[in-house]
Amino acid sequence: MAAPDQADGEGRGLRPGGGPGDTGALKIAPSVLSADFGNLAEAVGEVAPVADWLHVDVMDGHFVPNLTIGPPVVESLRRHSPLWFDCHLMMTNPGEYLEAFAKAGADGCTVHVEIGDTDELLDRIRGLGLRVGLAANPDTPFEALEPHLGSVDLVLCMTVFPGFGGQKFMAEVMGKVAQVRRAIDDRRLAVDLEVDGGIDAHTAGVAAAAGANVMVAGSAVFGHDAPWEAVERIRAAAAA
């Protein structure tokens, strides 16, 4: 089966209004970490008509034990894709690169609460006109995120320890996801709640039941013979 046609402008990924979609609405964000880096633009094009965002994993080899892509690749992809670029900066020094990612075409940048200087980083992201995200590793408690909920557009709860794709979903993180969801709802905040790690057609429903509305999926999408079909299966599982 061929990939759906991106040229008709009907796909979710074409974001005709240029925005990230309604806050709180279900969104599927394929992760380029698991795509074929030798044919990246084509791989992204296969999911663009059915995806909501594109999740761009940036790893520096220090904060996590892997090294991936930087602003030049984001800039190259931007020339080929109208998707909303959700850039996850797994870096010890993201502040040094925020402006470069903004210029390259990032739409939102997410930094990790574990690295510190959180308020300053969030302010800098906002000042660059980017959507502001804050991530936490599986063993980082809700209390580390809670003071910043009113300053962000997105909270990312990692459901694996970041660094490599294809890891097993950590269901024990769902308690924290539920805490974040309750806090967002109780305070009536316009904040998306994202999960990343081991998300597939089986675990997406578990994450959605806990309160997540943005599903990042890498190997479950790009490891599939028909990645566009995998996106829709994950969407259906989360919606159910």
Image: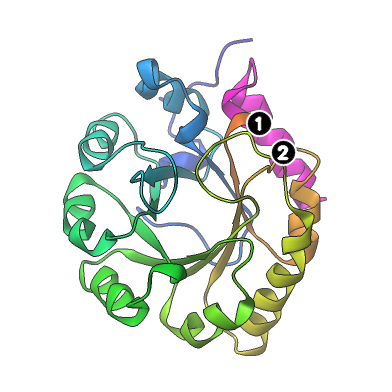
**x 68%, y 42%: residue:** 198
Residue range highlighted in magenta = 221-240
Compared to residue 81, the image places residue 41 above or below, namely above
Q: Residue 63: x, y in percent?
A: 40, 54
Compared to residue 5, the image places residue 179 above or below, namely below
Q: Estimate how packed mark 1 is, as few (under 14), some (14 to 19) or many (20 or more) residues with alpha carbons within 10 Å.
A: many
Q: Are marks 2 and 1 in contact (CB under 8 Å)?
A: yes
Quadrant of the snapshot with the N terminus: top right
Question: Relative to residue 228, is residue 204 drawn left or right?
Answer: right
**Residue 110 versus residue 81: which sits nearer the camera?**
110
Specify the quadrant of the image occupied by residue 168.
Answer: top right
Residue corresponding to mark 1? 220
Can you see residue 48? no
Compared to residue 204, the image places residue 94 above or below, namely below
**Residue 215 versus residue 92: which sits nearer the camera?**
92
Q: CA distance from mark 2 to mark 1?
A: 5 Å
Question: Relative to residue 82, is residue 169 drawn left or right?
Answer: right
Q: Residue 101: x, y in percent?
A: 23, 51
How many numbered discs? 2
Q: Residue 177: x, y in percent?
A: 69, 68
- Element under label 2? loop
**x 23%, y 64%: residue:** 95
The kind of secondary structure the magenta stretch mainly shows is: helix
- Element under label 1? helix
Q: Is residue 5 magenta?
A: no
**Residue 3 versus residue 17: which sits nearer the camera?**
3
Q: Is residue 234 magenta?
A: yes
Q: Which label is found at residue 200?
A: 2
Q: Residue 233: x, y in percent?
A: 73, 34
Name which residue type carries label 1: Ala
Name which residue type carries label 2: Asp
